[in-house]
Image (cartoon, grey):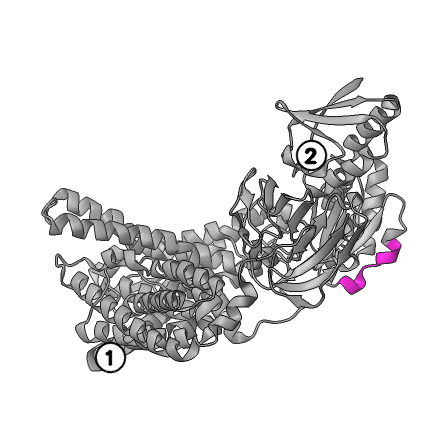
Amino acid sequence: MSKKYESLAGTIVEKVGGSGNISAVRHCQTRLRFTLRDTEKADKEGIGNLDGVAQVVESGGMFQVVIGMHVAEVFEEVEKLVPNREGQEEPDKGNGKKMSPVDYVIDFVSSVFQPIVPALSGAGMLKALMALLTVFHLVNSDSQTYYILNFFADATFAFLPILLAYTTAKRMKCNAILAMSVAGIMCHANWMALVAADEPVKFFGVIPFYLVSYTSTVIPVILVIIVQSFVEKWLNKVIPKAVNLVFVPMFTFLIMGTLALSVLGPVGDYVGEGLALVFDWLSTNASWAPAALIGGLFPVMVMFGIHHAVAPLGSMQMASLGFDSIFGPGCVCSNIAQGVAALVVGLRTRESKTRQLGLSTGVTALMGITEPVLYGLNLPKKYPLISAMIGGGLGGLYAGVTHTHRFATGSSGIPAVLLYIGDDTMSFFWNIIILLLITAVSTAAITFILSLKFEKSVEIQAQETAAIENEEKNTVYAPVNGKIVEMGDIPDPTFSEGVLGWTMGIYPEDGIVRAPFTGKIVQVSDTGHAIGLEGNDGMELLIHVGVDTVEMGGMGFDPKVKEGDEVNAGQELLVFDRKAVADAGHPDVVVVIVLNADDYTATELVAEGTVVAGTKIIQLKK
Amino acid sequence: MKTFDYTIKDEVGIHARPAGQLVKEAKKYESKITVSINGKSAEATKLMAVMGLGVKCGQTVEVTVEGADEDTACEGIRTFFEENL
């Protein structure tokens, strides 16, 4: 655009510490938003004094330069000065803080396996469908249809190395297309033909290739792509720019193809075989152990994130043996146990909030999603977690003893029982039902017994969160549990300067927003992050969750009310995912604004510190 | 009475912050300022009503200004829209 913005952009980039200090830059309607590697390097005052810059705001790890209406033009110029960071949008984690080796491994494993889960479960469900079709004699297992369905389902497993090459390359930040091509070399039918021919293979007559088939394998390709990421970087450095488009891929194929088939593939295959051997040994000599261990300890593994490292054992077993007798059964036991424990707590407690939490998260856990129940209820209350671990362990033990195994990977809730139909028999299906009953009954019994001891104090707690009775006029009750923050301390000028009206905020402790008084819902924003209400006494109030959360476009926000609804004080209005807000880089302060404070003679904050939802927080006087 | 049309360029539409700024701006004038879209209209001094319109990027609003200072008010509001929305 014009020279004016070009020079302004140049000065801003220089003053935030140079383009090297910028790990990401975006803009909204008035601001440039920088994610800086080191905010110390930025000259906040200097930028604020620039002609064309209105203000500099630092919040939520973002360095924001308020430009005003010409922000798009300035951004265009800034973008030219910042090297293209495609493929590394994620800001560096922390200020050069290194992840611990354990965290790194867990992070690596989960980012390599998580993206392929949909394909694995799709293929898995196809296998379940095939099993059902044959069990009910709808399709004959030697028919063409069966044969076709079989390779529909098998393709994912057969070409697992190619899928893993993609995810590994993404994680290692190297070229995913080249990575998948190299995996293709390993899975190529002609290589398989050489393996099948079983005659020694020598490349150029000297380099021996080991006769290993890589279709359906996991570890070899991951090893290959990790090495490839370094080879590719090195090639990009040594090959002149002018010709690297042609020669980097060519040499990558030559080098990696050779390394894959001669060294890395066989090594990976060996490691994979080794792990499989351990499990083979366990399942022949102590077959009850693996599933029982996972059934009992899975919640602990989830807490420490180790479950991501254990999950692939299931995929590996699946790839090499065609079934999974460890992870699947153990995991489903554990999830069902957690769900049942929460349901029992929900029924036993007299605390309304816990009841809701127990019943809702209990049901989701039965469907295989246990993070809410684990962190929301079982872990804080401890005794349901202990019951669930015992119950899950018992179920896992039964699975181990009976060799119950699943024939496909999928979610680990009740619907997963379908995955246990296979080998043209229903016996594993009945076994999984029996073991889930064992799990459910034992967990329920233990939870119930323990609840007699631990749920005594419920009545006292119940008073704290009970619906608001004797509601007073011209009063706002806290919409969330959390810590009160005064207007001036809200990390956003629009709110802290009270542009919209009389303002205060609460840093929430959970993600449930409740009606602050009895009245009517006037407005729910499309993005679910803001709700406007009008009280029966005429008060107009806006509850705005988080700062700049409009940018999340509704992700993580689940409004429970709509425009025109009548609500009672204390009723649930909105549930939001605090983690999603944090991940998006926004402060999650719940901002409460009295829009028509002008109609009152006085507006006063009447609470401080940490409050529970339903505490009186604002008192207005006519 | 004066009116003008304006097409919203702000990516997220008229959400809390710009709506608040609009209300603040509208309160400066004596004239009654109305924002309309798709048959719904809201008085520009009422924040909840303005947000309730749910105006999104790319939509066109009609702004009506009526009152003693309508000439200056119309100019002021038009400038506000152009600079902020």
User: Mark 1 sits on what residue?
Assistant: A281
At 22% from the left and 53% from the top, the residue drawn is: A128
Q: Is residue A42 magenta?
A: yes
The magenta segment: A39-46
At 34% from the left and 63% from the top, the residue drawn is: A205
Residue A108 drawn above or below residue A126:
below
Residue A442 lies left or right of residue A228; in this view the side is: left
Camera-nearest residue between A479 and B11 = A479
User: Residue A243: x and y, percent?
Assistant: 58, 47
User: Mark 2 sits on what residue?
Assistant: B50
| Helix, strand or loop status at disc 2 | helix
Please name which of the two marks, 1 or 2, marks the residue nearer to the observer: 2
Q: Which quadrant holds residue A523? A: top right
Label 1 amino acid?
Answer: Trp
User: Residue A275: x and y, percent?
Assistant: 32, 74
Q: In what quadrant of the picture does the N terminus of chain A appear? A: top right
Q: Which quadrant holds residue B11? A: top right
Camera-nearest residue between A329 and A228 = A329
User: Residue A620: x and y, percent?
Assistant: 75, 52
Q: Is residue B75 magenta?
A: no
Label 2 amino acid?
Answer: Val
Residue A50 lies left or right of residue A363; in this view the side is: right
Q: Are marks 1 and 2 in contact (CB under 8 Å)?
A: no
Main secondary-structure element of the magenta-colored stretch? helix
At 18% from the left and 66% from the top, the residue drawn is: A431
Residue A377 drawn above or below residue B61:
below
Q: Which quadrant holds residue A519? A: top right
